[in-house]
Amino acid sequence: MLPSPRNSPDGHASLIERTQCNLLLHSEGMETHVEAIKEVAPHIRIVQVPSFDDFRNRGSESGPYDGHYSEAEDASVLVLHTSGSTGLPKPIYLTNGGLAVTGLFKDMEKPKGRQNTADVLFAADKPMFCMSPFFHAMGAIMMSRSLMCRAPLVLAPPEKPANAQLVLDVLEKSR
């Protein structure tokens, strides 16, 4: 599950209960949000994951994804959630197969006389600015795009809502 740091304590508690989450993985710098979750879900086990550079230095322990699916395609592998604007956030379960569909867009036939947006979206090795945090559906699509195409993402800070100045700052710093 990818919870929004903007969720209320009640929203976190509801999502954790509804999804039966018992382990929270977090990166460095998220300690304040982790503490807020721990207050409403004291049973949850918390583990800080290695940094991106640590993961990158380990290298690949498996080959690239071959695009074939198995009986596990219906298994839920990622949980997003609604915004909670009409009550508490509700979990949205994504399956292996659902995420894999994103990779199939790049093989779709182009409409006659038009550019296929998938050619731009799935351009390998080209960085792409992702304004949506990973707890948002578009952020999850961009994350899978990055993994499937081995293409880097430039990310905005997840705890801040996007605005024009933030976009300009990210573009300037990432070139």
Image (spheres, helix red, strand yellow):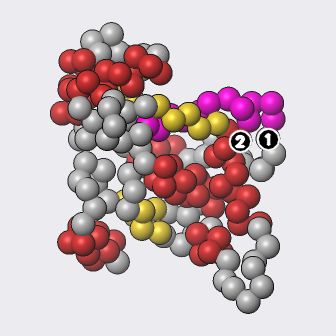
Instruction: Please report the bounds of the magenta region as a residue range.
Output: 70-81
| 52 or 173, nearer to the observer | 173
Q: Would you say 103 lies left or right of 21 here?
A: right
Please name the residue that numbered disc 2 is placed on. 97
Q: Nearer the viewer, residue 58 or 36?
A: 36
Residue 17 versus residue 141 in the image, above or below:
above
Q: Quadrant of residue 124?
A: bottom right
| Upstream in sequence: badge 2 or badge 1 | 1
Query: Looking at this rendering, what residue extends furthest in the bottom direction?
Result: 113
Count residues near mark 1 (Cα–Cα under 10 Å), then give few for <14, some for 14-19, many for 20+.
Answer: few
Identity, as a three-letter code, of the amino acid under mark 2 = Gly
Q: Is residue 46 visible?
A: no
User: Looking at numbered disc 1 in the image, what kind of residue is underneath it?
Assistant: Tyr
Label 2, secondary structure: give it.
helix
Residue denoted by label 1: 69
In percent of width and height, residue 47 lies at 36, 25
- Eyeballing the image, is 54 above or below 90? below
Q: Position of residue 46 (x, y in %)?
A: 34, 21
- State the quadrant of the C terminus: bottom left
Horizontal side of residue 119 vs 78, given as left or right? right
- What residue is rendered at 47% in x and 38% in y? 80
Spatial separation of the CA atoms under disc 2 and disc 1: 7 Å
Residue shown at 73% from the left, 58% from the top:
104
Between residue 117 and residue 70, name the one nearer to us. 117
Residue at image point 46% right, 53% down: 139
- Residue 78: say if magenta: yes
Pointer 2 with pointer 1, Cβ within 8 A = yes
Q: Position of residue 101 (x, y in %)?
A: 70, 51
Which residue is at 69% across, 57% downward? 103
